[in-house]
Image (tube, rainbow, N blue to C red):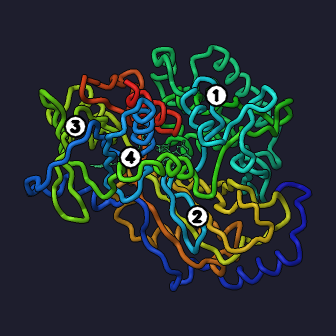
Amino acid sequence: MGQGAPLITRRAALVAGAAVLAGCAPARPETSGGFSGAAVDRGHLLRTRADWPAPSVTKRVEVVIAGAGVAGLAATRALRQRGVEDIALLDLEDAAGGNSRASAIGGIACPLGAHYLPVPGDAAPEVQHLLEELGLRQRVNGRWRYDERAQCHAPQERLFFEGEWQEGLLPLAGVGATTLAQYARFAQEVERVRAGGAFRIPLAARERLRPWDGETFAAWLDARGFRDPQLRWYLDYCCRDDYGAGAGTVAAWAGLHYFAARHGFQPPGADSAGEREAVLTWPEGNAFLTRAMARPLGERFRGGRLVLRIAEQRHGVEVDAWDVATQRVERWQAARCVVALPAFVAARVVENAPQPLRALALSVRHAPWIVANLHLSALPWERAGMPLAWDNVVQGHDTSLGYVVATHQALDPAPGPTVLTWYAAPGEPARGQALQQPWTHWRDRAVRELSVPHPELPQLLVRVEVARYGHAMPIPVPGALTQLPKPPDSGRLRHAHSDWAGYSIFEEAFTLGHRAGLS
Ligand SMILES: Cc1cc2nc3c(=O)[nH]c(=O)nc-3n(C[C@H](O)[C@H](O)[C@H](O)COP(=O)(O)OP(=O)(O)OC[C@H]3O[C@@H](n4cnc5c(N)ncnc54)[C@H](O)[C@@H]3O)c2cc1C
């Protein structure tokens, strides 16, 4: 602990003492919970079941959109903007949103996956327009202003480092001059890279990123002498947070993109130090956006439909889907289809899948993710040091990424029960294990980790819901961007999913979907 550590308040000390006596036990065995989120078993039917019955009903629409994630919803919105209303948007889940869906526990909304959107820059006009349409961005006196309810309220981030909470995620408490010098030099390096203009969201000219696609971010840092353990912990954390894989796995461009395409890297002491990237967030995370896009669709959205086959034909497209509710196969005939499915699924269901799609499906390496929502009877106790923030990270864990507070954006001044959304990226080799573990494994792991800064947590815990993602997002490994094929769009089939961007964020998925709907 650094010199001059703040005194723990008397109340906090009492609580901490009680918890120590209780042995920082994992969650009480009676803590209820289970799995939520992705219907893993439905998706797996595609490879485990072969005896699908013949279609028992045929329906006709102008356009079928397969997959109602951000990309599929954006494509649907763009089609409707063009006046195309005769649409069927099919998804295996009962709700639209894909990785950007939400849940509620004890009446408290909480994300199941994606939870924030950085304020989009001018390179993402499609996303800016969506925010204007939803009333989240307005021009006031000639300047753009974002809805204050959606802007992440302060305090935004804190790190549990050396036994206490500090502001921001960059380790600062008690770090030496060498560390500070490395922070400053890395900031200069990011500025140099940024000035070249190759880094932007969404990615534009991929070939301009080629110089950073041949090696891992870790190798790139090593080659430049960035070896300080605190800097390296922070950069590794950022990679795991954005891509579900560490600096030793992702390409150098991806590690730099995190900063160079956004707000840069602010070392302590710089004029801009302490400035946080403007981030939009909601109690239900990005499901605020996907629900807003899905709301006007009415009957056009068909949940509980597992797409089994997409066949391009001379006069149209045929899409077969398993209706989970009726246990029948439906046949949809349409003039066109937007395939907004993950590439590995699209390659399986698109008949005679074109070579670029097969190549993408074979090359994408996926990161698994775990999201555990912890319902607590009260907020964790405040201790001295930085107070509870929206994003709270505990240093010293290489798979978990900390937690966000689902009630952080609530304007209710009386703190009551809450939900902490805990994220973990267990790494590509652990996918099988991540899916096989019982939900209690993740409950106990989250509780064990969070009991270090919050010893009272087991006593506050009411319920835990765990969402598993086996193929959460593509990992931008070295070489993947250079080899990324272009979507093999034909007159009748358009492809849109964040897999085609090589990494997964809202802006990429939305822009790809929007363009597929417009073309
Ligand atoms: C845990 C987690 C946290 C994240 N956090 C953030 C964040 O904070 N901010 C951010 O910008 N991004 C985040 N992301 C990235 C997120 O993936 C993207 O923002 C975006 O949601 C991707 O949308 P998509 O449409 O490309 O893909 P998906 O969300 O994968 O959509 C594909 C859709 O296809 C459906 N589908 C699949 N197979 C079939 C089938 N056979 N039949 C019918 N439907 C099918 C799926 O159910 C899904 O709805 C996060 C991702 C995860 C997993």
User: Would you say the beta carbon of the disc 1 residue lies within 8 angstroms of ligand 1?
Assistant: no
Residue 35 against residue 330 in the figure, above or below: below
Residue 415's x, y, as percent? 76, 71
Q: Quadrant of residue 437?
A: bottom left
Q: Kindly tell me whether residue 176 is visible in this rendering.
A: yes
The answer to whether residue 139 is left or right of residue 9 is: left
Q: Is residue 390 above or below residue 334?
A: below
Q: Name which of mark 1 and mark 2 comes first in the sequence.
A: 2
Q: Secondary structure at mark 4?
A: loop
Q: Which residue type does callout 3 highlight?
A: Ala
Label 3 sits on a secondary structure element that is: strand
Dot label at residue 109: 2
In front of the other: 321 or 344:
321
Earlier residue among tags 2 and 3: 2
Instruction: Give the residue number, with chain letter if any, for mark 3.
Output: 334
Q: Circle 4: is it few (<14), some (14-19), or many (20+) Cα within 10 Å?
A: many
Q: Marks 2 and 3: which is nearer the front? A: 3
Q: CA distance from mark 1 to mark 2?
A: 28 Å
Amino acid type, callout 4 = Ala
Q: Amino acid at mark 1?
A: Gly
Q: Secondary structure at mark 1?
A: loop
Q: Answer with mark 4 or mark 3, whichever residue precedes in sequence.
A: 4
Whether the residue under disc 4 has CB within 8 Å of ligand 1: yes
User: Which dot marks residue 121?
Assistant: 1
> Which of the two discs, 1 and 4, labels the residue nearer the N terminus?
4
* Distance from the alpha carbon under mark 1 to that under mark 4: 25 Å
In x, y percent, where is residue 517?
Answer: 39, 31
| Quadrant housing residue 236 | top right
Q: Residue at x 66, y 36 (%)?
A: 119
Question: What whole-number distance in Å separates the C-alpha atoms at marks 2 and 4?
Answer: 21 Å
Q: Which mark is residue 68?
A: 4
Whether the residues at callouts 2 and 4 have beta carbons within 8 Å, the answer is no
